[in-house]
Image: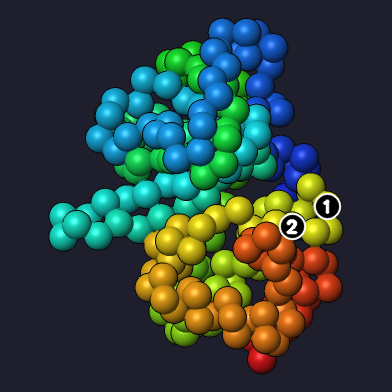
Amino acid sequence: MNLTSEWAKYENESTFNLSILPKEIVDMGTWITYAPKSFIVTRGDFPKYLYFIKSGTALGTKHYTDGNEYNYFQIDKSNGNVGMLEVFAKKNSYVATVISVTELVALRVESAVVYDFVMTNQEMLRRCITLIAEDLYKRSGDDGIFYYLDGLNRLRYYLIHYYDTHKDEGKRVVIEAQYEDIAKNIGVSIRTVGRSIQKLKALEEIASKNKKMIITDEKYKLLLKNLWS
């Protein structure tokens, strides 16, 4: 048997977001619009609901006992669901607080409904496995990469990933995240983020308009090249 050929059999079953939910599941949910900086779920609460994002961006924040917090994942419509990890791990509390960055529209569905649907459907199980495996693989890689990267290259890595997850909206991506959110996401100070942004502007790796960073396809390639140079 050839592993690449086996992968190819299921290459179209690699997403688990709002777009693949059947109408009967969607009809059982409730549409909710969140203003920016609204709480979607709170760490420690029972995962009664799953949330599937239609539009907007959110950040998952984990709080530590020393008072620090770390934004360790970002979600939007491409990878947009909240609560899947907890429900399929059979854990009785959300592992992170999830807060909207922009205005966000999501479908809220009872977790038990989605869980029953997935567990009795082989295609959905395959999609769920892929989702969780890709997330674990990425996190494992990020941990190692961040250990060796300085502040400037951590920011490059963040911007490259941000472009990758938003480029379906066009070849010009506006970074909506605030300095504070970026700092928490990559594990550096807000001051380091500010200094690094100024360096990237001077190197013409990013552009800006109305105090927001802009990445074009050309600048994305430059960021990628300089990250590993």
Q: Look at the image and tell me in which quarter the N terminus lies.
A: bottom right
Q: Name the spot of residue 130 as percent of width and height, x first.
A: 59, 44
Toward the left, the furthest residue is 66
Q: Residues within 10 Å of mark 2 (few under 14, many from 20)?
A: many
Residue 141: image location, x then y, percent: 51, 68
Q: Give the side of residue 36 with respect to residue 87, left or right.
A: right
Check disc 1: other Cα within 10 Å, few if <14, some if 14-19, many if 20+: few
Assign a secondary structure to mark 2.
strand
Query: Which residue corresponds to mark 1?
Result: 170
Quarter of the figure with residue 10: top right
* Residue 192 in the figure: left or right of residue 10: left
- The answer to whether 214 is drawn above or below residue 39 in the figure is below
Q: Residue 198 sits in which quadrant?
A: bottom right
Answer yes or no: do the residues labelled 1 and 2 have beta carbons within 8 Å?
Answer: yes
Disc 1 marks a residue whose amino acid type is: Gly
In percent of width and height, residue 87 lies at 40, 29
The answer to whether residue 68 is seen in the rendering is yes
Q: Which residue is mark 2?
A: 173
Query: Which residue: 71% across, 38% down?
Result: 13
Question: Which amino acid type corresponds to the residue marked 2 in the rendered image?
Answer: Val
Q: Secondary structure at mark 1?
A: loop
Please identify the residue farthest to the bottom as the structure is shown: 229
Side of 199 where 73 appears, left or right: left
Q: Tell me if 161 is positioned left or right of 72 in this view.
A: right
Point out the residue furthest to the front here. Answer: 210
Q: How is the image coloured?
A: rainbow
Marks 1/2: CA–CA distance: 7 Å
Q: Residue at x 57, y 33 (%)?
A: 104
Evaluate whether residue 137 shows in this view: no
Residue at the image position 32 percent from the left and 50 percent from the top: 62
